[in-house]
Image (tube, rainbow, N blue to C red):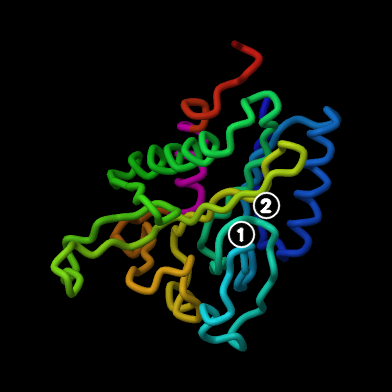
Amino acid sequence: MVEWITSAEPVPYEEAVAVMEARAEAIAQARAPEAVWLLEHPPLYTAGTSARPEDLRDPHRLPVHSSRRGGQYTYHGPGQRVVYVLLDLNRRGRDVRAFVRALEAWTIDALAEFGLRGERREGRVGIWIVRPDRPPRPDGTPREDKIAAIGVRLKRWVSLHGLAINVEPDLEHFTGIVPCGLHEHGVTSLVDLGLPVGLGDLDAALRRTFARHFPDPSRG
């Protein structure tokens, strides 16, 4: 069984990483069940393993933490649901690409519960929303905004990190970085899209849709 954990107050980043590391090791040793941890962080930036220094536009605005997850710079803060997914890929199949695709599909399904069409884009990690309500890009193509970031790491084939889905964060803080290294695209949230949704609503949608993409491997 997967244990679901929800933190009521924002968790400092370094503290969360330490908890994740310890839990991943316990899962690898079969001393603890797999887990999905739902939390928020205080306002901060994280730099993934592919982060480029020039993409940190305002290095003095918020604390910056180096992260061993894949990806580039991202923002975390109140109103954003961080979803740390601690699953044992030894039992679920040692296929990193399939795991990331499952995270994407899970996010898309959860957003669909609110009538949103989240989409993948080749060469752009994360989940995107087409914005016909906004002026098109200079080349005439529709504007697309990112609503969810994905960054993972594996330790002994146990996953760490996971998703960051924007419910109602301060979108202005994203201007301090080039989110995920993509200059030509924006960032949105459920509330920015006009939906009266809170973290609890998203949590419920994530729980309802989880098993479609991460079924219990013990049931064959």
Residue type for callout 2: Ser
Estimate the x, y position of residue 114 in percent, counting from the top left: 33, 44
Residue at 69% across, 44% down: 154
| Residue underneath mark 1 | 40
- In the rendering, at what x and y percent does residue 4 appear? 65, 37
Magenta run includes residue 203: yes
Under circle 1, the secondary element is: loop
Q: Earlier in the sequence, mark 1 or mark 2?
A: 2
The residue under the point 62% across, 68% down is 46
Q: Residue furthest left?
A: 140
Q: Is residue 195 left or right of residue 8?
A: left
Assess disc 2: are there few (<14), some (14-19) or many (≥20) residues with their C-alpha within 10 Å of its C-alpha.
few
Q: Residue 157: percent from the left, percent from the top?
A: 71, 36
Would you say the residues marked 1 and 2 are in contact, meaning their CB atoms lie under 8 Å apart? Answer: yes
- The N terminus sits in image quarter: top right
Answer with the quarter of the image where residue 71 lies.
bottom right
User: Position of 166 compared to 59: left or right?
Assistant: left
Q: Residue at x 58, y 69 (%)?
A: 51
For the point 33% across and 65% down, the residue is: 192
Q: Is residue 178 above or below residue 14?
A: below
**The one of 177 and 95 positioned closer to us in this rendering:** 95
Question: In the picture provided, is 62 more to the left or to the right than 113?
Answer: right
Magenta highlight range:
198-209
Q: In this view of the protein, which residue sits in the foreground, 149 or 125?
A: 125
Locate the C terminus and report the quarter of the image it occupies.
top right
Residue on which the image places disc 2? 7
